[in-house]
Amino acid sequence: MLNFNALQKGWDLHRKEETLLLLATTIENSVGHWVGLQTAFEWQLQQTATLFEQDRRTALVELQARLQRLVD
């Protein structure tokens, strides 16, 4: 069994690699990934629309506010 320190080091390495990948990702790539996920899960999103509509609207408002701060 791995000890906690070894587990923590592995997690830290994973986070560093993830951060580097995110920094290297372009907006176009990010949008492409999002569109792919949206397409793959569209049927599930439609089935759960009524359950999560308010959460999605809240998230959209927060996203729009963040984007507006980038523009300002």
Image: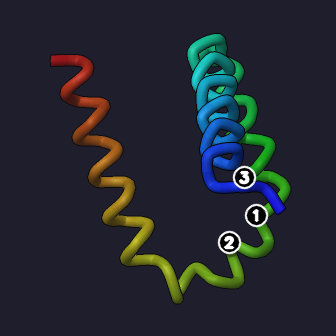
- The picture places residue 61, in percent across and down from the top left corner, at 28, 54
Distance CA(mark 3)–CA(mark 2):
8 Å
How many neighbours does mark 1 have within 10 angstroms: few (below 14), some (14-19), or many (20 or more)?
few
Query: How far across and down, in percent of the image, does residue 38 sit?
Result: 72, 52
Q: Quadrant of residue 12?
A: top right
Q: Give the residue displayed 78% in from the left and 63% down from the top.
A: 41
Residues under labels 1 and 2: Cα distance? Answer: 5 Å
Question: Residue 20: which quarter of the image?
Answer: top right
Label 1 amino acid? Glu
Q: Marks 2 and 3: in contact by CB < 8 Å? A: yes
Q: CA distance from mark 1 to mark 3?
A: 6 Å
Who comes first in sequence, dot 3 or dot 2?
3
Is there a contact, CB below 8 Å, between mark 1 and mark 2?
Answer: yes
* Residues under numbered marks 1 and 3 in contact, where contact means CB atoms less than 8 Å apart: yes
Query: Residue shown at 40%/73% (left/top)?
Result: 55
Judge by depth and name the residue closer to the eye, 38 or 8.
8
Q: Secondary structure at mark 1?
A: helix
Which residue is labeled 1 in the image? 42
- Quadrant where the N terminus is found in the figure: bottom right
Please indicate whether residue 14 sits to the left or right of residue 69 in the image: right
Q: Which mark is residue 38?
A: 3
Above or below residue 10? Residue 23 is: above
Q: Secondary structure at mark 3?
A: helix
The residue labelled by disc 2 is 45
Residue 65 to residue 44: above or below = above
Q: Position of residue 21 (x, y in %)?
A: 68, 20
Q: Secondary structure at mark 2?
A: helix
Q: Is residue 52 left or right of residue 16?
A: left
Instruction: Name which residue lies at 69% across and 76% down.
Output: 46
Q: Residue furthest bottom?
A: 51
